[in-house]
Amino acid sequence: MQNHHESKRLAVGLTVLSALGRLAPHAPNVTPLGGSCLFAGSRIPGWLAYLVPIVVMAATDPLVGGFHMASFGIYLAFLVNVWIGRRLVRKVTPARVGAAAFLCSLQFFLISNFAVWLAGDATPVPYYAANLQGLMACYAAAIPFWYRTLAGDLVFSGALFAMYELLRSRFAVESSATVS
């Protein structure tokens, strides 16, 4: 990849393809979306890093259950993943990607389950009591899903960053071979 434009196109393409992976059959919460957002934040410049994963989510939401009361919190948590990518993974190392993926999973757990607890109060039969005990019950019930989210974020983040570097170096070799 000889120029910034080609690297950006590759990063956008990988982000879109991986985010579309949420349409493939998967275990609950084991999707590439968290890793896609982290990757986008690290490798796509400017506002496009925030826009690409959110557009893919909005386009695929009707196919995977639709928009619901807690969706705002879920979208917010994925935007935080992009922000974490922008701040923590400027220089890519396995340790940085792993730490950032862990942080992404943790903040997603906290924000999305807070949104679920908050949205439950707006339903005719609330899921959890509208107090601290209800919030803690919501978090406790979600712990098994957090482990799955963490596993998905670690695996897919690692895979995305590795594929990007592999493809980038492969295209750089091919580009230099054709220039000679």
Image (spheres, helix red, strand yellow):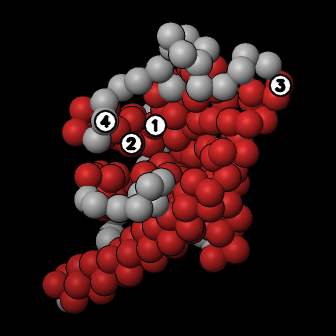
Dot 4: element:
loop
Measured in 3D between alpha carbons, the distance from the residue under mark 1 to the one under mark 3, in whole angstroms, is: 32 Å
Specify which label sits upstream in the sequence, 2 or 4: 2
The image shows residue 3 at horizontal and vertical percentages of 34, 63
Contact (Cβ within 8 Å) of mark 1 with mark 2 = yes
Residue at point 38%, 81% (across, down): 166
The residue identified by callout 1 is: 50
Q: Residue 65 carries which label?
A: 4
* Identity, as a three-letter code, of the amino acid under mark 4: Gly
27, above or below 111, in the image:
below
**As rendered, which of 169 and 138 lies closer to the eye?**
138
* Identity, as a three-letter code, of the amino acid under mark 1: Tyr
Specify the quadrant that holds the N terminus: bottom left
Mark 1 vs mark 2: give the one in front. Answer: 2
Measured in 3D between alpha carbons, the distance from the residue under mark 1 to the one under mark 2, in whole angstroms, is: 6 Å
Q: Which residue is farthest left?
A: 178
